[in-house]
Image (cartoon, helix red, strand yellow):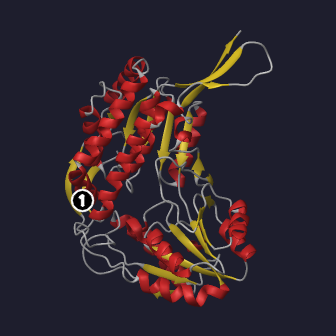
Amino acid sequence: MTKYATVDPTTGTVVREFATMSDADADQALVRAADAYRLWREVDLADRAAVLAKVAELHRQHATELAKLMTLEMGKPIAQAEAEVELSASIYDYYATAGPALLADEELDIAGTGRALVRTAPIGPLLGVMPWNFPYYQVARFVAPNLLLGNTILIKHAGSCPQQALRIAEIIDAAGAPAAIYQNVFATTDQVATMIADPHLQGVSLTGSERAGSAVGAHAGRHLKKCVLELGGSDPLIVLPGADVDTAVTAAVAGRFWNAGQACTSSKRMIIEASVWDQFVPAFVEQAAQWRAGDPMSEDTRLGPMASVAARADLAALVDDAIAKGAAVHLGGEVPDGPGAYYPATVLSGVTPAMRAFHEELFGPVAVLHKVESVDAAIELANDSPYGLGSAVFTRDANEADYVANRLDVGMVGVNTTIRSAPDLPFGGVKNSGIGRELGRFGLDEFANKKLVRIV
């Protein structure tokens, strides 16, 4: 049985537990979502947008409380938690303001007589399976476009974020949303599978591990349900000759250690051209050392605990394997004594394909530095990964940046910047990083019926 509990990652103390729902309640949630869909899809688009605008307002109104819940349940430093609440509010705002125009009918230029247009329409109840690492933001990017469309939502949040899951549901209810257009479900894994198979449900979105995505994607395909999967990443950050190395170092350190490195789009592999290696490495290590672990409730803390002791153990096993096989440790690399799920900022080099850390995702505060001899070698190494989510390339040469961007097998490329989410920018990857796109106008199309209307 899936367990929902708040466990303080700074101590490992169980703060509060919640029961999973019964099978009968899970079935009823689907029926309510289907009934609500028939009403919600008929609500005027401006009124649906007004609900999203109120959701954004309530996120900001309760920002301190929401951030503290995030810090309690998954250990994110409070300043970073506050930033996530604001990002989430901005997503609801974006779809409330820009969304209606993006849903306007698209006239087609046709060869035949009469007119043809494409209308973006909802498809019905959807299930979102959400992760713990960005508990408000990842809900917002799924929920906002789909509520605007007229779909209804069931959210199965991570087992470690139950209080945040309940607060999101309360906020959407307080924003004036009709009953059952958004429901939080404390579902088991078996109940999730049953929901996906149920004829009432029309699609599922999962953000999580490659293993979970494979299972959900296979089950959705078996029942002919649309799915969007945002899975892992092992993002390369490439620094080429002529780059502003100071800028690259600062971006690389923040990109790697923000949220204790627990982000799909963290810059996990730093690929440094040989001519700038000796400048980049000491500067990177020096800045990384400033990310010291501390109390996540302090505004001064940059590096909080990892989300759980289990997650830390998985990360430590990858680091220990690399060190045992000859990787060099520039910083960190040892599990600290004491309570909680803390792990220090760690920097490795000399990681080879014989080590697990070469191809597996390091989901925590560990950076891997690679030296390469050319631009093409950097591209080859960057693409030598089962993942293809985000990436970054630092160079002052615009032609070189374009050359690299065109050859990286990823869904997103940042030039002289790491990938950071914004409401109006599409988010998603290729290869084992998933299927589909979220945010921007693309986020409105994944669970939509692109309906052709032919008028003669």
At x 56%, y 67%, the residue is 360
Task: Say left or right for 22 vs 357.
Answer: left
Give how far across and how far down residue 175 sits, in percent. Answer: 27, 33
Characterize the local packing of mark 1: few (<14), some (14-19) or many (20 or more) Cα atoms within 10 angstroms.
Answer: many
**Up-down: is 145 above or below 325?**
above
* Circle 1: residue type: Leu
Q: How many marks?
A: 1
Residue in front for this viewpoint, 216 or 263: 263
Instruction: Tell me residue 232's x, y (percent).
Output: 53, 57
Res 327 visible: no
Q: Quadrant of the C terminus?
A: top right
Q: What residue do we see at 44% from left, 35% from top?
A: 127
Q: In this view, does 348 lie to the left or right of 372?
A: left
Image point 40% across, 35% down: which residue? 96
Is residue 395 shown to the viewer in this render?
yes
Residue 311 or 272: which is nearer the viewer?
Answer: 272
Quarter of the figure with residue 454: top right
Which residue lies under the disc numbered 1?
Answer: 72
Q: Which quarter of the figure has residue 55?
A: top left
Q: State the SS at label 1.
A: helix
Is 254 placed above or below 173 here? below
Task: Please tell me in which quadrant of the rendered image residue 304 appears.
Answer: bottom left
Say which of 187 and 276 sits in front.
276
